[in-house]
């Protein structure tokens, strides 16, 4: 199947299609369509009867996939919590595979108007869907000093959270922080020796909070499991421990489901709901990291539904 050349490099694309596409005639979903790179690779492995749908809460991502991929692809600009209803209608037999790539796309990072990167000057937005919800500037404006510090600790695991949080709150009280470069300068002045490490953590913290990413991640995993057929697989790509931890916990819950009888400690454990075709996470090759440095922290995990 001939497809247009990708506009970006999909992370671990070869490994994704190797472990995801087990049935060329099956139905597949990319829950984080991004720039459509993984979708194009999946399409290349499918028979004419195989199908792919793409989901993304970012309307610009959906527009990009619609522009570069075949028109026959089903595309939905929705959140994970809405996926089950749409997919159940689209694929009554269940999906053969679901991909969840939890990374921020290169397009989002490289677009100053989105405010995802401290390297670009732009509005302090950071919303996956710029038309919905509260942006990062508004979030900072309503948080207390203690809440800002807690946010940096919880979502950025930032060791200098107290110093940075106090500086952000103080400066925001004097004049609202509305741009990425002003926030970046506040961080640099508060921890000059550690700014190169603190800056990505601060922006990560705000992005996760603004988009409720951990809650969305958990809903995405549950939705994927719900629409998966027996023998189908879920693949996840995570980029830091805050994403990878709930993925591992979810996988464990399917490998070792809890007994339904809490009053019977001697009851036999229920059989597993899933198996792991790949033991532990797969990582990008050194060659891929050289070609695409943003892939360096990626971890690919695979789980297969067996009942």
Image (spheres, grey):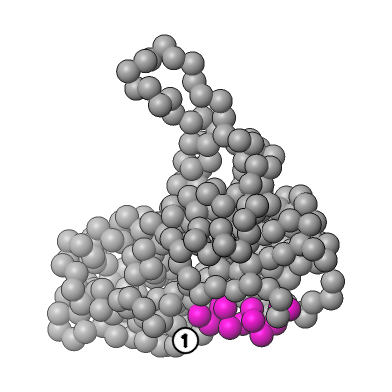
Task: Give x and y (percent) for residue 98.
Answer: 62, 56
Q: Residue at x 24, y 61 (%)?
A: 149
Magenta-highlighted residues: 59-70
In front here: 244 or 121? 244
Disc 1: CA contacts within 10 A as few (<14), some (14-19) or many (>=20): some
Q: Quadrant of the C terminus?
A: top right
The residue that label 1 is drawn on is: 112
In this rendering, is residue 252 above or below 199?
Answer: above
Residue 161 shown left or right of residue 236 in the figure: left
Please tell me which residue lies in front, 134 or 123. 134
Q: Nearer the viewer, residue 124 or 58?
A: 58
**Relative side of 68 to 129, left or right:** right
Q: Is residue 113 above or below residue 193?
A: below
Nearest the eye: 200 or 10 = 10
Q: Is residue 51 magenta?
A: no
The quarter in which the N terminus is drawn is bottom right
On screen, 178 above or below 17?
below
Q: Is residue 66 magenta?
A: yes
Q: Residue furthest top?
A: 266
At 15% across and 84% down in the image, what residue appears? Answer: 174
Q: Residue 173 at x, y = what percent?
A: 15, 79
**Secondary element at tag 1:** helix
Quarter assignment of residue 99: bottom right
């Amino acid at each position: 199947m001939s497809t247009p050349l990708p506009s970006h490099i999909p992370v671990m694309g070869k490994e994704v299609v190797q472990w995801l596409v087990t049935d060329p005639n099956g139905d597949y979903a990319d829950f984080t369509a991004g720039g459509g790179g993984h979708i194009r690779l999946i399409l290349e492995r499918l028979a004419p009867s195989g199908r792919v749908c793409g989901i993304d809460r970012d309307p610009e991502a959906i527009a990009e996939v619609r522009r570069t991929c075949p028109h026959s692809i089903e595309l939905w600009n929705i959140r994970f919590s809405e996926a089950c209803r749409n997919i159940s209608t689209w694929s009554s037999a269940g999906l053969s595979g679901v991909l969840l790539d939890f990374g921020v796309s290169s397009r989002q990072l490289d677009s100053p108007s989105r405010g995802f990167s401290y390297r670009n000057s732009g509005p302090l937005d950071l919303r996956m869907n710029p038309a919905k919800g509260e942006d990062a500037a508004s979030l900072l404006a309503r948080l207390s000093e203690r809440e800002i510090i807690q946010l940096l600790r919880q979502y950025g695991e930032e060791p200098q959270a107290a110093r940075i949080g106090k500086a952000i709150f103080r400066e925001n009280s004097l004049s609202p922080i509305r741009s990425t470069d002003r926030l970046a300068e506040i961080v640099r002045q508060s921890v000059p020796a550690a700014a190169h490490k603190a800056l990505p953590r601060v922006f990560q913290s705000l992005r996760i909070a603004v988009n409720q990413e951990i809650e969305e991640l958990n809903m995405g995993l549950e939705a994927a499991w719900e629409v998966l057929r027996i023998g189908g697989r879920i693949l996840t790509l995570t980029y830091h421990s805050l994403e990878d931890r709930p993925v591992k916990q979810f996988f464990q819950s399917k490998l070792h489901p809890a007994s339904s009888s809490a009053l019977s400690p001697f009851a036999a454990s229920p059989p597993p709901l899933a198996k792991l075709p790949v033991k532990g996470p797969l990582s990008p090759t050194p060659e891929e990291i050289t070609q695409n440095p943003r892939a360096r922290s990626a971890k690919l995990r695979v789980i297969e539904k067996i009942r």
